[in-house]
Amino acid sequence: MASEKTEELYRRLLQMGYPKDFCAQVSYRNLNTDYTAGRMLGYLSREKKPRLEDLVDEMLAILEDRRRLVQKKEAEQAQAAISYMYQNGLNG
């Protein structure tokens, strides 16, 4: 089930005149979280009618930012586990 933001993004893209299949790919397959859909909605509020290529570039940039954020959180969790081991030993 798609999030509310994902549904909003899909409808917005359709209203802007993009092909239905394209709208579904962007919304339901790629930007299917509130965070990513919200970012794209923000982009669309600043741009009047971006070309398909520009919209895809923005989508890829949003996905890359999300990937970096996930990696950062994973590294922080790993560092916290290592710090805990240093402070409490392996049996702590």
Image (cartoon, rainbow, N blue to C red):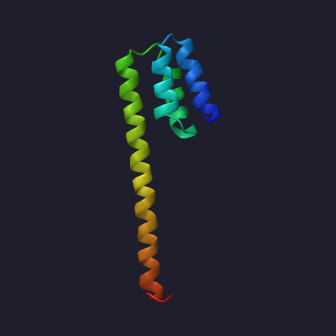
Residue 56 image-quadrant placement: top left
53 relative to 40, above or below? above
Q: Quadrant of residue 3?
A: top right
Location of residue 2 in the rendering, given as x and y in whole percent from the top left corner: 61, 34
Quadrant location of the N terminus? top right
* Residue 90, placed above or below residue 18: below
The location of residue 83, given as percent across then percent down, is 43, 77
Task: Tally the numbered discs.
Answer: 0
Q: Position of residue 89 (x, y in %)?
A: 44, 88
Q: Is residue 9 left or right of residue 90?
A: right
In this orientation, which residue lies closer to the viewer: 89 or 26? 26
Residue 41: which quarter of the image?
A: top right
In-front residue for pair 18/44: 18
Q: Position of residue 57 (x, y in %)?
A: 35, 27
Q: Is residue 50 left or right of residue 10?
A: left
Could you tell me which residue is drawn at 46 percent across and 13 percent down? 49
Residue at the right extreme, as displayed: 4
Position above or below: 86 against 78: below
Residue that appears at 44% across and 52% down: 70
